[in-house]
Image (cartoon, grey):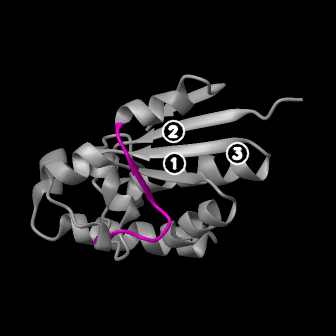
Amino acid sequence: MEQIKLAIIATKGSLDWAYPPFILASTAAALGYETQIFFTFYGLQLLKKKLALEVTPLGNPGMPMPMGMDKWFPVLGMTLPGMQGMMTSMMKKKMQSKGVASVEELRELCQEAEVKLIACQMTVDLFDMETSEFIDDVEYAGAAAFFEFAGESDICLYI
């Protein structure tokens, strides 16, 4: 039987958007899928050695809020200084209390499971990023190289 292939495109660089590509990729790899994640634009933040990811409640109106804040707290209030940091702290505590692995742990799981992590070379060049900022074992390629795999994949996800 031929191995199932999963291609993921990761475009977001916030804490809440870091989880889906790594959870899906590590799960697929555990199920025996050949898996690649192509990180482009802000998704490249997820490959940095030092992660400084925050939650973006303002850009995610579907985010459940503590104390029912999503029902009574004005959206404009999310722009207040310190709100993003507070929401990030609350999210990290919630995840820890529920036993959810950290982004770093999930990323390591992916690497151990041989998920191919590909940084978009064009985006690295566009934002003048240094490859020394990124974790080891990242490949650098353009969209055309990723499409060679994605074109053959059974599942392609855009996150």
The residue singled out by tag 2 in the image is 8
Where's residue 16, x and y in %?
40, 55
Q: Where the N terminus falls, by quadrant?
A: top right
Residue that label 1 marks: 21
Residue at far right of view: 1
Residue 23's x, y, as percent?
60, 53
Depth check: 126 or 78 in front? 126
Q: SS of the residue at dot 3?
A: helix
Up/down of 128 relative to 105, above or below: above
Type of amino acid under label 3: Ala
Q: Quadrant of the C terminus?
A: top left
Mark 2: give few (<14), some (14-19) or many (20+) Cα within 10 Å: many
Cα–Cα gap, marks 1 and 2: 7 Å
11 or 37: nearer the viewer: 37
Q: Residue at x 50, y 46 (%)?
A: 37
- Does residue 58 appear anywhere in the picture? no
Q: Amino acid at mark 2?
A: Ile
Residue at mark 3 to residue at mark 2: CA–CA distance? 11 Å
Give the numbered dot on residue 28. Answer: 3
Point out the stretch of residues depicted in magenta: 133-142
Nearest to viewer (mark 1 / mark 2): 2
Measure the alpha-carbon separation of dots 1 and 3: 10 Å
State which quadrant residue 96 falls in. Answer: bottom right
Q: Are marks 1 and 2 in contact (CB under 8 Å)?
A: yes
For residue 139, side relative to residue 42 (left or right): right
